[in-house]
Amino acid sequence: MSNEAANVAILKDAYRQWHESKGGSVEQLLSICDPGVRWGSVPRGVAPLAFATEYSSRDALHGYFDGLLADWAMVHYTIDEYVAQGDAVVARGSCKWTYKKTGKTAETPKVDFWRFKDGKAVEFYEYFDTACAAAAAT
């Protein structure tokens, strides 16, 4: 199996568990990350998405998941396509979350960029409709 195929297989399993557990598979997601993973998100920590900011280690990344799951409940997280080249994988799909305090939902296209080294994720950046998410939180 090529590195590209192996990296896609890692992500397919991780996303399957993430979706099926409705966000309960945090430890499994963390396990595919290198201890020094760089993690980023398009909102860059702007309220009401303060958790969606920059992280520079797997240990610090607990803050992302703690913040996300404290305020949001997953409805679905669906990845429809994987594009791999070299050590990079792009996952494209959609997700829907409910903001717990308002009961409003945000459904948005989702694109995640991953970079792997030796079978572990060393870089991640997510892209989604931040205006949609912010509207659900107000």
Image: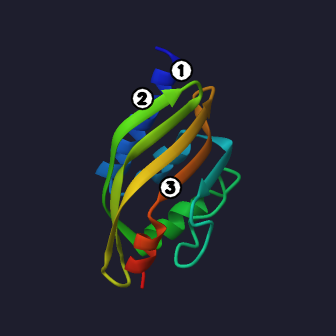
- Looking at the image, residue 5 sits to the left or right of residue 45; the answer is left
The mark total stands at 3
The disc label shown at residue 3, or none: 1
The answer to whether residue 24 is visible is no
In the rendering, at what x and y percent does residue 127 appear?
50, 55
Give the residue type at disc 1.
Answer: Asn
Determine whether the residue tagged by mark 3 lies in a helix, strand or loop. Answer: strand
Tag in front: 3 or 2:
3
Q: Which residue is mark 3?
A: 127
Labels 1 and 3: the sequence-earlier one? 1
The disc label shown at residue 40, or none: none
Residue at 40% over, 44% down = 92
Give the residue type at disc 3.
Answer: Tyr
Picture layout, residue 133 above or below residue 121: below
- Looking at the image, residue 112 sits to the left or right of residue 36; the answer is left
Give the residue type at disc 2.
Answer: Ala
